[in-house]
Amino acid sequence: MLSRHVALDASRLEGSVSMTAEHHYMRTRGALMSEQKPLHLTDGAIEELVGICEDIITNLEEAMGKSAALDWVSGFGGFDSANQLEVGYKRKGSGGEDSVYDRLIDFKEAVEAMRDAFRAGGDAYADQESAVMQKIAGIAGGISS
């Protein structure tokens, strides 16, 4: 279900998003802009984006439920090092800080922030975008550590 949304056909939203050529150039180049320009979305695009966010949230919630099974790891053997490895896997699975479960919560919160911004009519997207990007950057930083 999620892959259906990841491969969203941009032509379906053509004309739904108004953005100046300069703004598009600056955004695609990753340049920092001193002045935020509003992003306006048509009602149809807003509803579709909110729906996509809802689907992603549902998938993340399902994954959060499944992550509880990560507590049940075995087969490492009886050596002390094997027991330590088992404890580490359980901690990273769903029992400790920076666990899979915690990361799924972080991603869910980021998607909820995007959904809420879209629901606000798209105008709030420009304000929310930097907060969401900061949250995603924090998540990515935590994963790579």
Image (cartoon, rainbow, N blue to C red):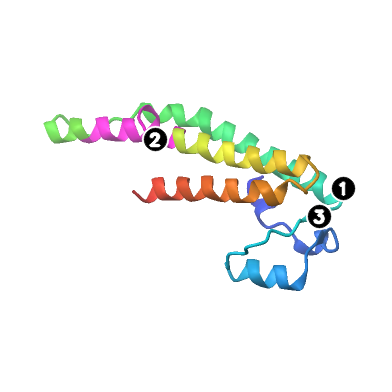
Q: Which residue is mark 3?
A: 40
Magenta residues? 85-101
Q: Is residue 133 left or right of residue 75?
A: right
Secondary element at tag 1: helix
For the residues labelled 3 and 2, the Cα–Cα distance comes to: 37 Å
- Is residue 133 placed above or below 62 in the rendered structure? below
Secondary element at tag 3: strand
Q: Which residue is mark 1?
A: 43
- Amino acid at pointer 3: His
Could you tell me which residue is drawn at 43 percent across and 28 percent down?
Answer: 69
Residue 108 seen in render: yes
Q: Locate residue 29, reporting x and y percent.
A: 59, 71
Q: Main secondary structure of the magenta part?
A: helix
Secondary element at tag 2: loop
**Total number of numbered labels?**
3
Single out the mark in the foreground, 2 or 1.
1
- Amino acid at pointer 2: Ser
Q: Locate residue 80, reporting x and y percent.
A: 12, 31
In terms of image quadrants, where is residue 142? Answer: top left
Residue 79 seen in render: no
- Is residue 90 placed above or below 139 in the rendered structure? above
Which of the image's four quarters has the N terminus?
top right
Q: Is residue 135 left or right of residue 117?
A: left
Could you tell me which residue is drawn at 58 percent across and 68 percent down?
Answer: 31
Single out the mark in the foreground, 3 or 1.
3
Badge 3 or badge 2: first in the primary sequence: 3
- Is residue 57 placed above or below 12 in the rendered structure? above
Residue 99: mark: 2
Could you tell me which residue is drawn at 46 percent across and 45 percent down?
Answer: 139
Q: Residues within 10 Å of mark 1 (few under 14, many from 20)?
A: some
- Amino acid at pointer 1: Asp
